[in-house]
Amino acid sequence: MPPATPATGRNAAALWRPLAAFALRRPPGSIMVGLRSWNLGARSSPPISILEAPLLRNIPVNVARFSMIIGLAACASSGAVGGTARTSPDRITRSEIYSSNATNAYELISRLRPNWLRPGPTGSIGGGVVQSQAILVYLNSQRLEDLNALKTISAEGLESAQWIDAARVQTVLNQAPSGPVAGAIVLKTR
């Protein structure tokens, strides 16, 4: 008999004959898994099917494959959904302005970032006079009077809007007053 290399053709039949003969000699009520016979009536671990045996032999490989698939799915789902960009709480982009259908800057901000229009809490240091915090408005680096000026600016001509918090107002904006400031709304036109 030639050496049993790959199980193809005539050699395959020669390899399977001893297995078939062994399977015929097993006791009734048992099944064959690989080269082991399991008696279904005995109190032993349940038999595994021939299809499950290769999966059990490769548990570390299968765990690694599963982990890689989960990792790839997690990375793929972290991107933007449906082609829309994530919005920033401190910035309104041109695409957001266009999709809002707002007529003026005040309406735009009140729809998309209403918290920009709310001044922070008022207070005083050392028991002095209580002053409310102002929200500054800038249009192309020019300081405007107050929030009511937003109602006169057309949203159609805006390129972007940005919120600058009170801690950064003095360093980012020139001509910022030294009084109590809640933050600034900076508008840029096209």
Image (cartoon, grey):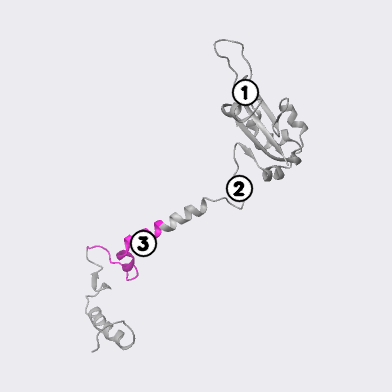
Q: Position of residue 29 (x, y in %)?
A: 26, 72
State the residue at coordinates (64%, 36%).
162
| Image-quadrant location for residue 102 | top right
Mark whose residue sits in front, 1 or 3: 1
Relative to 16, 147 lies left or right: right
Mark whose residue sits in front, 3 or 2: 2
Q: Are marks 1 and 2 in contact (CB under 8 Å)?
A: no
Q: Dot 1: few (<14), some (14–19), or many (≥20) neighbours within 10 Å?
A: many
Distance, label 3 to label 2, CA atoms, is: 36 Å
Quarter containing the N terminus: bottom left
| Residue tagged 1 | 181
| Residue tagged 3 | 62
Residue 85 got which mark? 2
| Image-quadrant location for residue 117 | top right
Q: Is residue 50 magenta?
A: yes
Mark whose residue sits in front, 1 or 2: 1
The secondary structure type at the circle numbered 3 is helix
The secondary structure type at the circle numbered 2 is loop
The amino acid type found where label 1 is placed reads Val
The amino acid type found where label 2 is placed reads Ala
State the residue at coordinates (74%, 27%).
148
Relative to 24, 116 lies left or right: right
State the residue at coordinates (25%, 62%).
45
154 vs 1, nearest the viewer:
154
- Magenta part of the protein: which range? 43-67
Q: Which circle's residue, 1 or 2, is located before the other in the chain?
A: 2
Q: Is residue 92 above or below residue 1?
A: above
The amino acid type found where label 3 is placed reads Asn
Q: Dot 2: few (<14), some (14–19), or many (≥20) neighbours within 10 Å?
A: few
Q: Which circle's residue, 3 or 2, is located before the other in the chain?
A: 3
